[in-house]
Image (cartoon, rainbow, N blue to C red):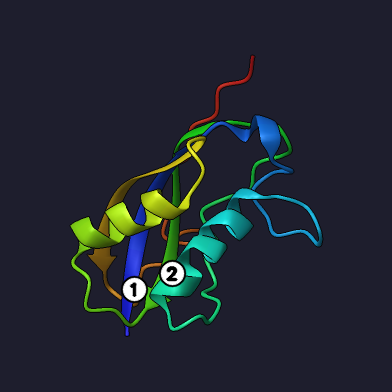
Amino acid sequence: MSRYKITIQYDGTNYFGWQMQSHKRTIQSEIETALVPLNDNKRVKVIGAGRTDAGVHAFGQVAHFDLDTKLKTVQLKKALNARLQDDIRINSVTEISDEFHARFSAKRRYYRYQ
């Protein structure tokens, strides 16, 4: 099993924020759903560096997940983007040490309020 770090860009207009919520579209739930067919139809937990509220956009949200796959990182990025709506894009996928944690390994975060 490998750990993957992803950098995500999204327009949050049509979502109820980052974090999973029952019966509501969220960024986390969309990415987890996109990972299901890549994991023998089993859910994969995606951990974000932080949470955004409903309607909030992100240009460089970082998250991680653990996945047993033979896909190379470039192929994994393409497979995820093919399964996501156009308002969510995976900008990068990197195989990373199991010690990395998107939330706790973050050195800084930037926010721009308008």
Q: Which residue is mark 1?
A: 3
Identify the residue at image location x=27%, y=73%.
Answer: 97
Local crowd at mark 2 within 10 Å, few (<14), some, or many (≥20)? Answer: many
Identify the residue at image location x=33%, y=66%.
Answer: 4
Identify the residue at image location x=69%, y=41%.
Answer: 15
Q: Quick check: marks 1 and 2 in contact, CB under 8 Å?
A: yes
Q: Amino acid at mark 2?
A: Phe
Dividing the picture into quadrants, the one containing residue 94 is bottom left
- Give x and y (percent) for residue 93: 29, 56
For the residue labelled by badge 1, is the local secondary structure a helix, a strand or a loop?
strand
Is residue 67 found left or right of 11 in the rendered image?
left
Q: Quadrant of the C terminus?
A: top right
- Give x and y (percent) for residue 16: 74, 43
Q: Quadrant of the N terminus?
A: bottom left
Local crowd at mark 1 within 10 Å, few (<14), some, or many (≥20)? Answer: some
Dividing the picture into quadrants, the one containing residue 57 is top right
Is residue 67 found left or right of 85 in the rendered image?
left
Q: Which residue is mark 2?
A: 65
Looking at the image, residue 37 lies above or below residue 25: below
For the residue labelled by badge 2, is the local secondary structure a helix, a strand or a loop?
strand
